Amino acid sequence: MKINEIFKSIQGEGKAAGLPCIFIRTSFCNLRCRWCDTSYAFYDGEEQSIDSIVAVVRDYHCPLVEITGGEPLLQKDAHLLMAQLLDEGYQVLLETSGSLPIDTVDPRVRIILDLKCPGSGMNDSIHWPNLERLKPGDEIKFVIADRNDFDWAKAVVDQHHALTDKTVLFSPVFDELAPALLAEWILKENLPVCLNMQIHKFIWSPERQGV
């Protein structure tokens, strides 16, 4: 597998926010979101064996691991990596864009599906059958740039009953949409969604890698 970086940090988003977590960032992405904050993973990285990746993970002594990117599902060995980590007792999160099918992902993995709003410029990439394949306990994230994105995400949540038992995250584009404004919209519309802040960007510099 081509790996961009492996590091231990504080989980910045979702249900596990605030917990220590090991991040395995894969190289390559099939999308080019306008607000992407990890474009350095588009191409850069080193080929590593699954055994060598797992060895690095073991050295961090942390039970929570997230596979992220880039887009992890572009690499076929991502499934083997997740299976090995699960078999060794790790809790495994997968963050994926939702542009590729998730039906072959190990059911023990907690999926974080980052569904692309229109403001990303990648809205046409969505593989809609994925919404029906999410499991209870999985999460779906909408990164929101403006009111149009908010209204679009609200409509998706309203129309897809498969999301009623999932954790739904509304995340403001960092330094573009004020979190207070997004919070006001959520409260006014009485939405059962979580305001999702990237807390690692408040702890460290937004431009810093490896956190």
Image (cartoon, rainbow, N blue to C red):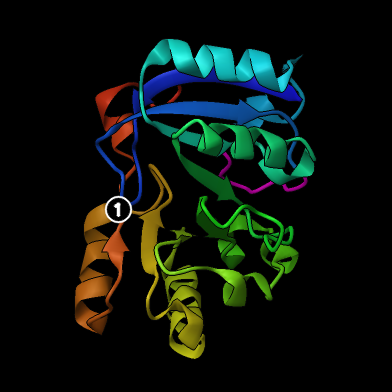
Residue 211 visible? The answer is: no
- Residue at 38 percent of width and 67 percent of height: 168
Q: Give the left or right position of residue 184, taking residue 52 as reference.
A: left
Q: Is residue 114 above or below residue 40?
A: below
Residue 182 visible? The answer is: yes
Is disc 1 placed on a helix, strand or loop?
loop
x, y percent for residue 169: 37, 61
Q: Nearer the viewer, residue 13 or 143?
A: 13
Q: Quadrant of residue 35?
A: top right
**Residue type highlighted by circle 1:** Ala
Q: Is residue 156 above or below residue 51?
A: below
Q: Is residue 63 above or below residue 56?
A: below
Q: Give the left or right position of residue 17, taking residue 57 as reference.
A: left
x, y percent for residue 118: 60, 67
Which stretch appears magenta?
Answer: 30-37
Q: Is residue 29 above or below residue 60?
A: below
Q: Nearer the viewer, residue 113 or 105?
A: 105
x, y percent for residue 91: 42, 40
Write down the residue under mark 1.
178
Q: Give the left or right position of residue 131, taking residue 13 as reference.
A: right
Q: Give the left or right position of residue 148, taking residue 205 as reference.
A: right
- Residue at 51 percent of width and 52 percent of height: 108
Q: Is 35 part of what is drawn in magenta? A: yes
Q: Main secondary structure of the magenta part?
A: loop
- Residue at 73 percent of width and 31 percent of height: 42
Task: Please give the count of numbered marks on the rendered protein.
Answer: 1
- Residue at 32 percent of width and 53 percent of height: 196
Q: What is the quadrant of the N terminus in the image?
A: top right
Q: Residues within 10 Å of mark 1 (few under 14, many from 20)?
A: few
Q: What is the quadrant of the C terminus in the image?
A: top left
x, y percent for residue 103: 69, 63
Q: Is 110 part of what is drawn in magenta? A: no
